[in-house]
Amino acid sequence: MTTVTVRTPAGWPTTEDEARAVQDELRARVRAGASGPPPGTGVVTGVDVAYDDERDLVAAAAVVLDAATLDVVAEATAVGGVAFPYVPGLLAFREIPAVRAALDALPCPPGLVVCDGYGLAHPRRFGLASHLGVLTGLATIGVAKNPFVFTYDDPGAPRGSASPLLAGTEEVGRALRTQDGVKPVFVSVGHRTDLDDACAQVLALTPRHRLPETTRRADGLCRRALQDAITRH
DNA sequence: GCGACAG
DNA sequence: ATCTTGTCGC
């Protein structure tokens, strides 16, 4: 498994105003429409990030799974300094440098990338998943554990039930029940996909847990990478 | 003006 | 995200 060091890109935004301006400019580059292989086909990659703000440390992981078997095909991690503080609506500026480094360190193409957080379901319609997709050209979707600033009606109890995630009357994503009677996850389009495909992909990744197997694997790996980095120093 | 707010 | 023990259940 490969581990690399994260470098914050030159020109990376420093202020909130600057970051919002970047979102407003890049937003137009999002491409809609399903583009990749059908759910359960090819490979799918989970990415996640863990932090130790006290030590100014960030660790990201990218885990590639066989979409049919959900077996791990490849993994990579990246460790470095924190690029941006957490500000609701600006999560991408905190997570993307580390996530990109981990993706770049993979020995194979990632296929569809599943992000922790939102894509088009965002105050300016340009969340983490969309931002990562535009910068890399990869197909991405966002899967969040909380509804953020949006509203929704509770979906039916059976796994597979869904209801619109709403910004006023606009459907920006979907509340999707991935396990019978368990709190839904919140799915939105990132880049080069559509909402129906994104939800179908998520259901294929959740045969037995609320969260996609991709995010579960990536979460575990980035936490281990962070602990390793702390222990080594 | 005040609070809420992905991770 | 992170701080944090045990506990109930498949």
Image (cartoon, coloured by chain):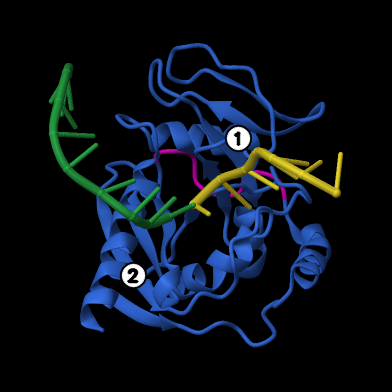
Chain colours: A blue, B yellow, C green
Can see residue A206?
A: yes
Q: Kindly identify the amino acid type of the residue bearing the numbered disc 2.
A: Ala
As rendered, which of A41 and A157 lies closer to the eye? A157
The kind of secondary structure element at disc 2 is: strand
Name of the residue lying farthest toward the bottom: A10
On whether disc 1 and disc 2 are found on a single subunit, the reply is yes
Residue under the point 53% across and 27% down:
A176
Which chain is mark 2 on? A
Place residue A218 in its image quadrant: bottom left
Place residue A56 in its image quadrant: bottom left
Which chain is mark 1 on? A
Q: Is residue A178 above or below residue A131?
A: above
Asked if labels 2 and 1 touch by Cβ distance under 8 angstroms, the answer is: no
Instruction: From the viewer's perspective, tell me whether residue A181 is left or right of residue A29.
Output: left
The kind of secondary structure element at disc 1 is: loop
Main SS of the magenta part reads loop
Residue under the point 46% across and 36% down:
A202
Mark 1 / mark 2, whichever is N-terminal: 2
Residue occupied by mark 1: A147
Instruction: From the viewer's perspective, tell me whether residue A63 is left or right of residue A144.
Output: left
Q: Kindly identify the amino acid type of the residue bearing the numbered disc 1.
A: Pro
Residue occupied by mark 2: A76
* Residue A143 spot, x, y in % from top left: 52, 42
Instruction: From the viewer's perspective, tell me whether residue A202 is left or right of residue A69.
Output: right
As rendered, which of A35 and A30 lies closer to the eye? A30
Cα separation between marks 1 and 2: 29 Å
Q: Residues within 10 Å of mark 1 (few under 14, many from 20)?
A: many
* Residue A96 spot, x, y in % from top left: 56, 67
Q: Which residues are magenta?
A: A32-40
Queried whether the magenta region covers residue A181, the answer comes back as no
